[in-house]
Amino acid sequence: MPATVVVGTQWGDEGKGKFTDLVAKEMHLVVRYQGGHNAGHTIVVDGEHFALQLVPSGILYDHIVPVIGNGVVVDPRVLLAELDMLDRKGVDTSRLRISGNAHLILPYHQEIDKVTERRLGKNKIGTTKRGIGPAYADKASRVGLRVQDLLDPKIFREKLEVVLKEKNAILAKVYNQLPLDPAGIAEEYLDVCRPRLESMIGDTVGLVHDALDAGQHVLLEGAQATFLDLDHGTYPYVTSSNPVAGGACVGAGIGPRYIDRVIGIAKAYVTRVGAGPFPTELHDETGDLLVDRGGEFGTNTGRRRRTGWFDAVMLRHAVRLNSLSEVALTKLDVLDTLDTVKVCVAYELEGERYRHLPYHQSVMHHVTPVYEELPGWKRDLSSATERTHLPKPALAYIAFLEEQIGVPIRLVGVGPGREQFLHFAA
Ligand code: GDP
Ligand code: IMO
Ligand code: MG
């Protein structure tokens, strides 16, 4: 049976959590396929906020099996804190399954992330300092520890001993930091984390395929977004995994033929956290208004997000990279008070016009956006539940975006609440 991917189309925080939760209602499994606790996915149910980092956004339904796939990097201490938070809110977390092949984030990854950013100074990436990049680097260098190593303390200790020698040398000699103690790490991971996670760890590839073979629907939840993708994003201002839809195959262990629906989540404007090019960025009061009305502060890090107008050039590229079958447009309500709304339809640099994303990063850093300006609607959309509730200028804005990006907008978000959306059938 088919699989559906939910993927961010901009620089993250588009509302993937909310829309994964929405779509999960019709699914059986929800699999997170990459990233780690750099993600912050928010779901709001009856006014209660759930900010998820590692746990898939299907967890709130009793019928869903939430799965942390092999492509994710897991800090077990953070995962346990998240499970505790969910338990306190009365959510049953016992169905969670964690791939034994997922890599572990260890304390030295976080240390190295922090000191590397410090060393980069003004060239820093603005990472979440969660150890994501160093953990994926170790995976690629084949010195990573995996979740399954928690189940074999002897192997865990042996691997840790070897890798920590090198990490401590780097921390001490390059960064002048105190070395980390292997016994302390082993105690925390093996004695504290392992007993609580043990029963959840297993072969998630088998689980996903058993579900598909049984005719069940699988939802693959991306973290971060297309333009933070290690290969396709605005390198080096990216994360260290592959959020694009293709990454879902690798990070969950399925072939591309299972995927028949790819939902791209796009904010009705654009935000970015951390450094890197942002052609439509606003440095004026409209930018501040988007921050205020959109609550544009990091879900977990609290950092203020940069804001700008909707960028159709980016979206056209996201359509290509992910084979988007449809778009879910989020946070339309944030634009409610504006007199006019701008959409970037192309870039310009030195007399040349770009309808598609320029391949060379230096061009991307210097382009000027070409805007179309549309009338605003000046109406509160937050209680709209049907297409017919939307004023004409809001419908015109959506139609214009659809025409620009070339795929249908099927869902529209008008507020953070689970019920604050409209279906936008063709
Ligand atoms: P994610 O990382 O893509 O899951 O997005 P985040 O949860 O980091 O950020 C999205 C924020 O917007 C969260 O605070 C959501 O509750 C909120 N949100 C999601 N959809 C909508 C919407 O349609 N309107 C408004 N006003 N807020 C929304
Ligand atoms: P969700 O899933 C927004 C950004 C960081 C930084 C860059 C690299 O909630 O959309 P990293 O810690 O991954 O090495 O940082 O990526 N970043 C995100 N920005 N939303 C996220 O996740 C992000 N995860 C990482 O700000 O610029
Ligand atoms: Mg987020």
Image (cartoon, rainbow, N blue to C red):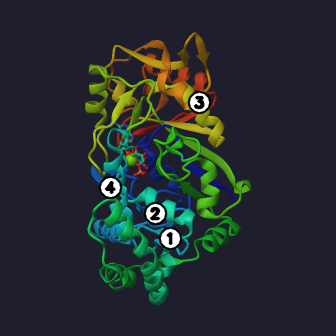
Estimate the x, y position of residue 72 in percent, counting from the top left: 50, 62
Mark before the other along the chain sequence, 3 or 4? 4
Mark 1 residue CB less than 8 A from any atom of ligand 2: no
Q: CA distance from mark 1 to mark 2?
A: 7 Å
Instruction: Please report whichever mark, 2 or 4, sits nearer to the chain's N-terminal start.
Output: 4
Helix, strand or loop at label 3? It is: loop
Q: Earlier in the sequence, mark 3 or mark 1?
A: 1
**Mark 2 highlights which residue?**
135
Q: Is residue 407 above or below residue 216?
A: above
Asked if marks 1 and 2 touch (Cβ < 8 Å), the reply is yes
Tell me which numbered mark, 3 or 2, is placed earlier along the sequence: 2
Q: Quadrant of residue 421?
A: top left
- Whether residue 382 is visible to the viewer of this picture, yes or no, is no
Which amino acid does the dot numbered 1 rest on? Answer: Gly
Q: Which one is in front, 219 or 138?
A: 138
Q: Which residue is mark 1?
A: 144
> How far is the residue under mark 3 from the one under mark 1?
33 Å
Cβ–Cβ below 8 Å for labels 2 and 4? no
In the foreground, 208 or 148: 148
- In the image, taking residue 356 as reference, residue 64 lies left or right, namely left
Q: For the residue marked with disc 3, what is the amino acid? A: His
Q: Quadrant of the N terminus?
A: bottom right
Residue identified by numbered label 3: 360
Location of mark 4 (residue): 114
